[in-house]
Amino acid sequence: MNIDMNIIVDYSLRIGISIIVLILTKFFSKITYKSMMKITEKTGRSIAYKNTSKVLINIFYYTLGGFIILSLLFKDFMPFLTGLGISGVIVAFAIQEPLSNFICGILLMFSKTIKEGDAIEVNDISGSVDQIDLNHTVIKTFDGKLVRIPNKTMWNSSITNYWPSNIRRSEINLGVSYNTDLTKFLGLINEYLKTSHLIYQDNEHKPFIWFSGFNDSSIDFSIKFWLKKDDYFEGTKKIATEIFELLKLNNIEIPFTQIDINIKRG
């Protein structure tokens, strides 16, 4: 069996150059991403899609590198691409759904509908946005699961953003006894809301007390107030504790549910 040494040398060189192209592709992909991060840090700006940007940069460089490698390994690769004909139409139909997801992913980013780290709910799935990749939005649920939702579904669905700004309203519902001096109770709560250092207040965000109704065993109110993101969960808990202690100190009862039974003797 005769083996043409020229062919062996030729393909060895092609394979060797292809490996170098692959290494350079990985290198330039990392350098581009790191450079972009350094530039944004120096300018004082933040990138809302760090993970997504990394994915897109990798896609660009590896796609470019892949075409270069294929053109190196196969001499007739470019003429083959230009002569796809009817096969190209078939391929176009095959990639219709992935292409829709890709375009919807771009729209999600440009419209800033969601950003990495946003706490959202979509189609009864709650969690934080981990990244938007080529076809899917990856959501990390609050119990640690990773859920991949097609970008097209994300774009066409109603999305609830739990933190559209740095503040959010919280509330505490409570009921007081029918024997309570309501003027005293409301005065205590209003004074507490004005002086609490945890509660965020400005001209458009003020705490208030909402009358809920007359219940069987209590007069019910809802205390509504605004908290900063970092204080939201611990702050709500601390405010509830402080209000409970304030009412206890002033002998204002939070009643248990009770039923009065009157027995008539015949």
Image (cartoon, helix red, strand yellow):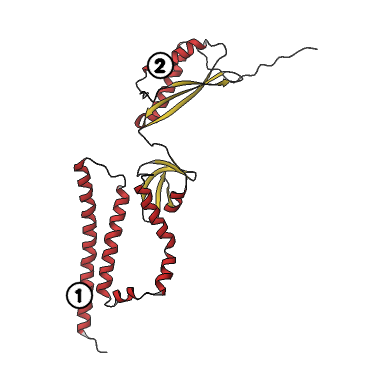
- Mark 1 residue element: helix
Instruction: Please provide percent x and percent y for residue 209.
Output: 47, 20
Check the image and name the residue furthest to the bottom. 1
**Can residue 213 be seen at all in this image of the molecule?**
yes
- Mark 2 residue element: helix
Disc 2 versus disc 1: distance between alpha carbons? 79 Å
Instruction: Please provide percent x and percent y for residue 59.
Output: 30, 59
**Can residue 143 be seen at all in this image of the molecule?**
no
Q: Nearer the viewer, residue 139 or 59?
A: 59
Residue placed at 29% from the left, 78% from the top? 76
Which is more foreground, mark 2 or mark 1? Answer: 2
28 to the left or right of 179 = left
Q: Disc 2 marks which amino acid?
A: Tyr
* Residue ID for mark 1: 13
Q: Which mark is residue 91?
A: none
* Residue ID for mark 2: 192
The quadrant where residue 118 appears: top left
Check the image and name the residue furthest to the right. 266
Q: In terms of sequence position, does the residue under pointer 2 or pointer 1 come before the other? A: 1
Residue placed at 24% from the left, 89% from the top? 2
Residue placed at 44% from the left, 13% from the top? 188
Q: Disc 1 marks which amino acid?
A: Leu
Q: Is residue 131 above or below residue 65?
A: above
User: Within 10 angstroms of label 1, few (less than 14), some, or many (20 or more) residues?
Assistant: some
